[in-house]
Structures are given as C-alpha cells and as structure tokens.
Image (cartoon, coloured by chain):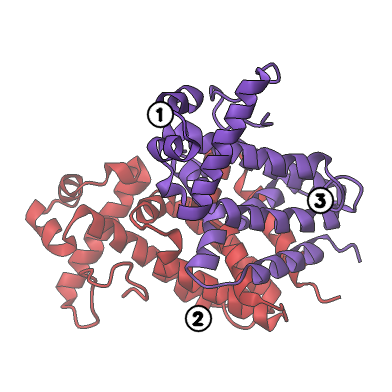
Chain colours: A purple, B red
C-alpha cells in the first residue's frame, strides 16, 4: 500500500494480500499508532503491541519481522499518505495551483508531518548513515526541484537541496521542542522564504 | 588566540604564553595541518604528529591533551580566522557592504571553508549530540540573523536557522564529494538564494 517502502524487503501489504490479512495488518498498525501517540516511539515494543492488539507475540513478529521493521512500516504508511497528497491530491498541495502556492503548501505540510512523526523520523534517520539516503527525502527533493524549475530558478536541483535541509526533521523537532519556536513561526517563515524566492517581479 | 574555543577547557595559547612556547605550538599545528592536507584527518595521530614535527610524543600530549583536543584546536584556529574575517575583516565579508552582499560573501566563504576543513568539521560534528550545539554554528546563525534583520526580514531568527541548515557541513561535503556537484554550483545557487531573499523591490 506504500509508495515508497523505506526498506525494499519490508513485509509490506501487497494488492493481492488476502482481505482478512489486510484487516489484521491495519488493526496492528492502528494499535501501534495509538501506542506511539500515547507513550512515544520508545514505548513501541513488540510485546507492548501484541498486548495492546490482543494477539500473540508470534503474530507481530511474522507480520513486521522486527521492531525496526514495524517502525519503518508505520513511517512508510504515513509518508505514503503525505506523498499521495502532494502528488495526486487537491490543490494547493497537489497539482492545479501555482508552483509558489504548491511549494508553500508542501513545506507547511512537511513541518506538521515532521512534528507528528518526529520520533519515528528520528529513529529512521538514525538508522541510515546519510540522512539524504531516506527514499522519502529523495522524493521530497525531487518534488521541490520540479516546482522550482517551473518557477524559472536557474539551478533547481541545488536550491531544492538547500530547502530540503531547511526542512530537516532534526532541525524542525529541535526548533520546536528544544528552542521553543512555535510551529506557526516555522510555517510563517517558510511562507516568507517561498514568496521571496519565487516572486517574479 | 581563538575567539571560540570549541571546548572551554582546551589548552589553547593565551596572550601571555611565552614566545618560544607559542612558536612550538604554531610549529606543531603547521605540521598537523600538513598531515591533514596530505593524508586526511584520519591519518592525524599523536604518533604521526610527533614524528612529523620531530619532537617527543610526550610534548604532543602535553600540548594538546589528546587526539580529540588536537583536532578541536586545529578546527578552532581555522574557525577563528573565518570569524575574524566576517566580523572585522574588509567588505564585502566584513562590515561596510550591504547586508545582501555580506550574506552572499558569508555563504561563499563558508562553503569553501567547509570544503577545506570538511574532515575536521565532520569529526567535530560527530562528537556533539546536536549539530547546532557547535559554538561556531551558533555564531554563524547569529551573524546571518543580524544581516537578515538589517534587510527587513520579518522573522530573521527562523530564516537564519533555515539558511544555517542549507550551509550544513554534511550537506556541502556530500553534495561535492558524493553527488559530484561542483563548488561553483553551490556558491552560484547561494548567491541566487540571497539575491532573491533580500531584493527590496
């Protein structure tokens, strides 16, 4: 169901998955999301999930392979929802709005996405040697590059990379949780950056 | 001699250091810089430095405490030269030019500084839990914040943070060495970003 599995060999659901298996998977993921929302990503263990979802621990391991696999699946599902929205959803995030409006909506959406999934993103980022190797980050970069090119930026690849780093999960989470910056200040500044970068006059 | 010792208890030279001791320190640091230039930061060991500078190993340990202390001293010296240039040096990097010209020169200088000192910066960054905790990074942020405020940006603190992340050493080193982007493309794009962010019409 995910556009971009964060690890190619994850036991993700396939379109041919039997419907009761799909329902079980969805039930386990809902329970996992509730655990993360309530107690943070650190509290999400295979034991806690089995207990919460009222299934045997073996079921949880068969489904996700490992705790890391479970975290990646959760994040991948959330990423794919966001990806679907900016690639195919309604404007201004999806197609149909101006590049500037789409880029504004993209950054705002990304900031809130990071704040909702910060602990999972941190876990995923810590698991990769290079933060840019995360497939979702590459797709974000590609999306921004296309919008910047449409707006006539001379080197959209490099500018998109600068903006990708400005939306770095570690930066967003630390600004809000460590340095006490409100999410609204981050989205207001993003809006200002995009307006200034992309104005045509 | 350094504005910002990267660790407060580093055995840095003081103004009252006896001149022969200062000469010895400078000779050791030159030898260390040559080793890094020739073989990379990984080759810089206390043994190699003692051998290169033709002194006893004990002298090297008395002077720098440890290999980490030596690395931090090297980086701190390089950072303080760059800091002196943007705080007190000639325009456009130093005072006397417009905020836009100073910010352009700052980013260009920073990109080349990172490429020259990439391995030391990586070692320093890996040693801190949060990359923003590096004092030189805080001073860079503060400098950009002041220039953005002079240019009338609504929230210069947050925008400076976005730009600080765009100049992230890991990003710059990986763009050039892993992804094959030329330094000139990075400085051209930085120039374009600053021109667009700070134009007044």
Q: Relative to residue B39, is residue B184 depicted above or below?
A: below
Disc 1 with disc 3 on a shared chain: yes
> Circle 3: is it few (<14), some (14-19), or many (20+) Cα within 10 Å?
many
Q: Give the quadrant of residue B69.
A: bottom left
Q: Give the quadrant of residue A25.
A: top right
Residue at mark 3: chain: A
Q: CA distance from mark 2 to mark 1?
A: 64 Å
- For the residue pair B150 and A18, the one nearer the viewer reads as A18
Q: Residue at x 33, y 46 (%)?
A: B41
Closer to the chain start, of discs 1 and 3, is: 1
In the rendered view, does A184 fall on the left or right side of A191? left
In the rendered view, does B196 fall on the left or right side of B52? right
Disc 2 with disc 1 on a shared chain: no
Q: Quadrant of the N terminus of chain B?
A: bottom left
What residue is disc 2 on? B88
- For the residue pair A31 and A201, the one nearer the viewer reads as A31
Q: Which mark is residue A154?
A: none
What residue is disc 3 on? A93
Q: Secondary structure at mark 3?
A: loop
Q: Quadrant of the C terminus of chain B?
A: bottom right
Q: Relative to residue A134, is residue A36 depicted above or below?
A: below
Q: Relative to residue A123, is residue A115 depicted above or below?
A: below
Q: Relative to residue A104, is residue A29 depicted above or below?
A: above
Residue B187 seen: no
Image position, residue B84 (x, y; %): 45, 75
Residue B107 seen: yes
Residue at mark 1: chain: A
Q: CA distance from mark 2 to mark 3?
A: 45 Å
Image position, residue B122 (x, y; %): 40, 50
Q: Which mark is residue A57?
A: 1
Image position, residue A88 (x, y; %): 83, 39
Q: Nearer the viewer, mark 1 or mark 3?
A: 1
């Amino acid at each position: 169901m995910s556009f971009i599995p964060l690890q190619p060999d994850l036991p993700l659901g396939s379109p041919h998955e039997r419907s009761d298996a799909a329902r079980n998977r969805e039930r386990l993921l809902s329970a996992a999301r509730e655990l993360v929302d309530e107690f943070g990503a650190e509290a999400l263990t295979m034991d806690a999930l089995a207990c919460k979802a009222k299934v045997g621990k073996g079921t949880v391991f068969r489904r996700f392979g490992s705790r890391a696999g479970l975290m990646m699946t959760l994040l991948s599902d959330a990423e794919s929802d966001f990806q679907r929205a900016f690639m195919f959803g309604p404007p201004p995030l999806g197609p149909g709005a101006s590049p500037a409006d789409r880029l504004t909506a993209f950054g705002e959406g990304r900031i809130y996405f990071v704040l909702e999934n910060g602990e999972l993103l941190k876990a995923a980022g810590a698991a990769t040697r290079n933060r840019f190797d995360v497939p979702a980050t590459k797709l974000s970069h590609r999306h921004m590059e296309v919008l910047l090119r449409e707006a006539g930026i001379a080197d959209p690849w490099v500018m998109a990379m600068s903006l990708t780093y400005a939306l770095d999960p570690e930066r967003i989470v630390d600004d809000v949780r460590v340095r006490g910056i409100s999410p609204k200040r981050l989205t207001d500044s993003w809006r200002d950056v995009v307006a200034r970068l992309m104005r045509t006059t």
